[in-house]
Amino acid sequence: MVATIVKQIKDDLELHRLVPPVNVEVFARSLGVTRIKRSSIKASGMLIAGKSGYSMLLNEEHSWKRQRFSCAHEIGHLLLKKLGLANPGVSEARFQSPSSARKIEETICDQIAAEILLPELHFTKDAEGSNWSLESIDQLVRKYQASAESVAIRLVKLMPNASILGVWRPTSIRKMRMKLEKVISNTARYKLPNHVNPATFWFLRRALLGEGLEHGSSAVIDLYPHPALKEIPAEAIGLYPPSFRRVMALYFPEPKDPL
Ligand SMILES: [Zn+2]
């Protein structure tokens, strides 16, 4: 259901045709937001209906890239309201906790934000140009004015072949441990193990401490026909700022099409 609603909104507004970097505030105003204000709020963003239109509040303490994402996310809420679909998860979440409907709406708005900030036509062309590698991530971050993580997630979501993105956090350098903090995948067949083996640890650590992209290989769990570990090509890059101490790895269980 989430995918159907996002697709409907994307098609109605032709979001896939937007040209980067998308001016999200101008876009919000074109949809009826009359006032955009930065202030110290608890949330990332808020949308308030008024007599003459909508006001949007953005968290002034967040980075401008995050404010762009929040603005695009709030546009998502606005579009759902306009379609009469605000709280669209209600029917599906009837037998679940009341907060499920809210969660579904938030997921839809995050996906709409990605459709706005990383429009499909341009993004797919750029990603194909770099053969779906994290190689050009800095370039894409600059071009789309989005965070490295949202760019990487978009790569995985739009890539035609199976791919998995893992965000790892080192927990003990001495014991060579890293914890899987986030995983995004476009395939149900492959899964990432929750911990890294020593060989993979060094590959990820090089990426964490280095300046650029590292190539290596890593074990993923192939669930078909029965769960088995499979060594596959992977690439990794450190996430900025360094104080975050995260490393992002992209795994390719299926060979990519040649350029
Ligand atoms: Zn929201």
Image (cartoon, rainbow, N blue to C red):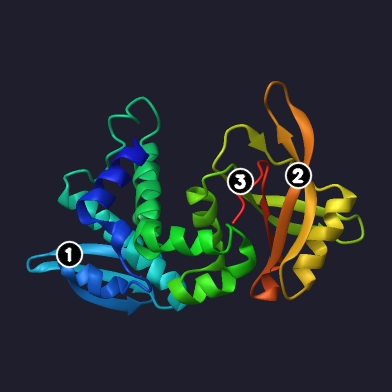
Instruction: Confirm or deny contact between disc 2 and disc 3 (CB under 8 A).
Output: no
Q: Nearer the viewer, mark 3 or mark 1?
A: 3
| Amino acid carrying mark 3 in the image | Ser
As drawn, the residue found furthest toward the right would be 174
For marks 2 and 1, the one nearer the N-term is: 1
Identify residue for label 2: 232
Report the disc number at residue 163: 3
Q: Position of residue 194 (x, y in %)?
A: 74, 43
| Amino acid carrying mark 1 in the image | Leu
For marks 3 and 1, the one nearer the N-term is: 1
Identify residue for label 1: 31
Q: Is mark 3 within 8 Å of ligand 1?
A: no
Answer left or right for 60 relative to 129: left
- Secondary structure of the residue carrying tag 1 is loop
Q: Quadrant of residue 205?
A: bottom right
Residue at (76%, 66%) from the top-left corner?
207
Query: What distance separates the C-alpha of mark 3 from that of mark 1?
Result: 35 Å
Residue at (56%, 59%) from the top-left corner?
152
Name above or below for residue 235 compared with residue 159. Answer: below
Report the disc number at residue 54: none
Residue at (31%, 37%) from the top-left corner?
89
As drawn, the residue found furthest toward the front would be 259
Name the quadrant where ligand 1 sits. bottom left
As drawn, the residue found furthest toward the left would be 51
Instruction: Confirm or deny contact between disc 3 and disc 1 (CB under 8 A).
Output: no
Query: What distance separates the C-alpha of mark 2 from that of mark 3?
Result: 11 Å
Q: Is mark 1 within 8 Å of ligand 1?
A: no
